[in-house]
Image: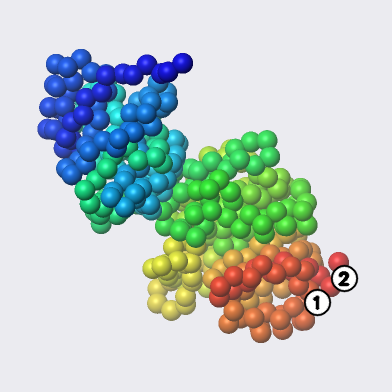
Amino acid sequence: MSLPTPRVLAVRATLDDSEALREALRRVDADGAEWLMLLDSGEAPSEAASLRAAPALPLFDAVFGGLETARGLWRPSRLAFDEAERLPHALLNWWVGEPRFLRAATLRNLLEDGSGEGRIARLFRLWATARCIKLAAPLVIAETEPAAGLTEAERGEVLRRLEERPAFLPIPYGDRIWRVPYTGRNAGIERDQTRGVFFEAAELEYVKARVGTGVRVVDVGANTGNHTVFFAGPMRAASVLPFEPLPQAAATLRLAVEANGFANVDLSMLGQGVGAEPARMHAVVSEGGGLGATRLEAGGEGGVPVVRLDDILTEPPGFLKIDVEGMELDVLRGASETIARARPPIFVEVAERNTGAFLDWLELASYRIERIFSDKGHANYLIAPLDS
């Protein structure tokens, strides 16, 4: 049985052109069409556009698609998704384009509620209030390849929106969906999360099997909360105490705890760094590495308080995770009494330049390497007491 074909009116209009959109609605009213097909300058419908969109039209209010040129499907347009949470990643890293099939009633609501909006604001509101899907298959053909990605101003607008309120990506694990924040500023971490998996999934699975459930976890360098969410959720820790000095990352982690409804995460140490001695330092954000590559440096008027774990922890941890961009030996030295007393397994990222000092620390602390997860410029180590 074939699907009924709704009446579609093709128009030259884009989401950032309110005048053209209003004229399109006037034409729709005169024509009696239910749907609009938005085409930019130099674009035409693909030969199979109607057939490709037909299965989605009864289910959605706006259908986006891929784009083809004389050379075939344009690769930046091939991403497919139907969840509003994935829109920011698609905008920042792929190509979304215009809604190729758009219900006239949906466009009317969009214009009535936001007549002064630009393209980015309208895209966010459209995906938040209407049923939207982005298909991988091309729905339009263009004379030339469009400029990939966003303008600098559009990218800035997307990032500002995410800073005010990050998107939350769903990660199915076990019997529920966990939520991790998408900031657009953590490329390495968020690349995995957009695929529906935790960052460093193999490492976390090993830790979960090795450490078990019901332990007290200390997460030093928690960033925006990927590992904290895993420890508190899938690993079912008795408690998680995250330390994160960067204000933006700490604020995002706080929202992640709220989004997942955790009652076993203690947020009292957010805004604190961890080191060998109490101090005040300043955070240096990496230009290319994102929030996760932020490091602490001494000197100047440091705004970040740095504490020793030995001075903070009142109960022995059952597991310690350390990821502090080269300060790992300082953290270990500032936790020497705690480690000697509790003897927890430790998951620590070690910069390549610190490998020799790390091996010396292992000997002094009577710890051994149990598992190595190697990466460029650093390695993650699961270490445990020699007598365990």
Place of residue 149 in the rendered image (x, y in percent of width and height, measured from the top left)? 31, 53
Say left or right for 82 vs 308. left
As helix, strand or loop, the secondary structure at mark 2 comes to: loop
Q: Nearer the viewer, residue 293 or 65?
A: 65
Residue 361, can we see it? Answer: yes
Q: Amino acid at mark 2?
A: Asp
- Where residue 42 appears, as percent x and y from the top left, is 18, 44
Image coordinates for residue 201, horizontal then vertical, percent: 63, 54
The reply to whether callout 2 and callout 1 are in contact (CB within 8 Å) is yes
Question: In the displayed structure, would residue 89 be above or below residue 39?
Answer: below
Left or right position of 208 against 349? right
> Residue at horizontal 32%, vertical 37%?
139
What residue appears at the point 34 percent right and 49 percent down from the top-left corner? 72
Dot 1 amino acid type = Ser
Q: Which residue is mark 2?
A: 387
Between the residue at mark 2 and the residue at mark 1, the CA separation in whole angstroms equals: 8 Å
Can residue 157 be seen here? The reply is: no
Q: Nearer the viewer, residue 153 or 214?
A: 153
Note whether 116 is above or below 61 in the view shown.
below
